[in-house]
Image (cartoon, grey):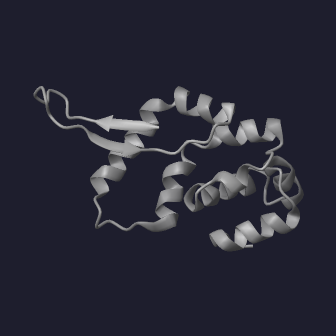
Amino acid sequence: MEVRLRKKGAPEGTKDDLRFMTVDSHWDTLRFVQDNMDQCVGNVVRLKKSGPTDNRGVNESAELFQKNLEPLVSSLAATQGQGVMDKLSASLKKALLLMVMERYQSDRETACRVLGISREKLENELKLCGVAR
């Protein structure tokens, strides 16, 4: 998805600041982005303001995602995951794992069922994302 940023009231011919946001093609994700477009664009603007010298890393990026992931977690619970973990960035994976583990009180069996992954895959993802056991 291409996001074009331009200051309000900018004169005609002002060059747009192009940013790209990768979104998977699952209907639930597309619906979430459509329903929350203002927040998505707000995140793009915040990232732009952070500048190239601000290297906040995975933990901080995960916090940005975590605030708005509740509808996605709910839809995952309804659809039983179906391989969603393989399509996510490290930041989004960590935020999703934290939310799922919190929502299901660290019940790994339920988390696996919701995410559509095996117990071994869950343990590997938790370890890779640095989520405490």
> Which residue is at a point 74% across and 57% down the rendered structure image?
101
Q: Residue at x 48, y 51 (%)?
A: 64
Residue at the far left in the pictured view = 11
Q: Residue at x 47, y 31 (%)?
A: 37
Q: Quadrant of residue 14?
A: top left
For residue 56, side relative to residue 81 (left or right):
left
**Which one is in front, 3 or 94?**
3
Q: Is residue 33 above or below residue 102?
A: above
Q: Is residue 126 left or right of residue 23?
A: right
Q: Quadrant of residue 92?
A: bottom right
Q: Position of residue 18 (x, y in %)?
A: 31, 42
Q: Nearer the viewer, residue 46 or 117?
A: 117
**Residue 11 showing in the rendered view:** yes
Q: Is residue 8 left or right of residue 87?
A: left
Q: Please report the residue visible at 51 percent of the width from the left and 31 percent of the height from the top.
A: 36
Q: Quadrant of the C terminus?
A: bottom right
The image quadrant of residue 73 is top right
Measured from the top left, where is residue 110 in percent x and y? 86, 52
Residue 106 image position (x, y, % from top left): 79, 60
> Which is nearer the eye, 59 or 102?
59
The answer to whether residue 132 shows anywhere in this view is no
Q: Position of residue 94 (x, y in %)?
A: 62, 60
